[in-house]
Amino acid sequence: MPETTRRDFIDAWADACATTILVADGFDDALVGIVEQFGRPPIAAYDYNLCIRLLMAQDMDETEAIEYFEHNVIGAYVGESTPAFIHLCPVLTPKPQCGTDSSARSAPAKTLNGRG
């Protein structure tokens, strides 16, 4: 019996829910799941950093991979069903690694109900 792939999961989920989920060609190994939000169609979700590593495996350096990815993949908006590219939270690092404003990094995350 063939191994089920991440793409197989997305296709089966879409079939079961009678919907279409757009995927980013060439990034199946970075697929992490499906995002659902109220009032919007479900969309495919990818690990941003893994997408960059996949491009780097195709003989791009990190800068080239980021520039290509941000312009040609993230920048390829195709409507509400455009896939999402997420920055996963590091398991061992309690603070986000983006931005230069230290006050933004030390602020606790808010939940949907407003309680930290």
Image (cartoon, rainbow, N blue to C red):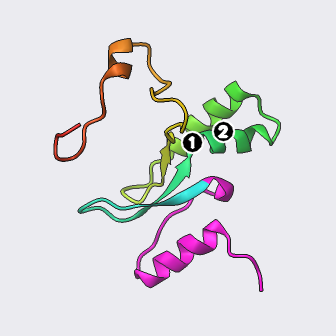
How many badges with numbers are in the image? 2
Residue 55's image quarter?
top right
Q: Is residue 72 left or right of residue 110?
A: right
What mark, if any, has residue 52 been given in the picture? Answer: 2
Of helix, strand and loop, which one carries label 2? helix
Of helix, strand and loop, which one carries label 1? helix
The residue drawn where x is 24% and y is 61% is 38
> Please, what is the three-letter code of the amino acid marked with disc 1?
Tyr
Which residue in the protein does label 1 denote? 48
> Please, what is the three-letter code of the amino acid marked with disc 2?
Ile
Q: Magenta segment, which residues?
A: 1-30
The residue drawn where x is 56% and y is 36% is 71
Residue 61's image quarter?
top right
Task: Using the image as rendered, state which of residue 52 and residue 103 is in the foreground.
Answer: 103
Say whether residue 10 is magenta: yes
**Quadrant of the drawing holding the N terminus:** bottom right
Q: Horizontal and vertical percent for residue 32?
A: 55, 56
Say whether residue 84 is magenta: no
Around disc 1, counting alpha carbons within 10 Å, would you say few (fewer than 14), some (14 to 19), or many (20 or more)?
Answer: some
Q: Horizontal and vertical percent for residue 69?
A: 61, 39
> Is residue 72 depicted above or below 67 in this figure?
below
Q: Is residue 69 left or right of residue 110?
A: right
Whether pointer 1 and pointer 2 mark residues with C-beta atoms closer than 8 Å, the reply is yes
The residue drawn where x is 29% and y is 61% is 40
Q: Horizontal and vertical percent for residue 106?
A: 35, 20
Query: Distance between the Cα atoms at labels 1 and 2?
Result: 7 Å
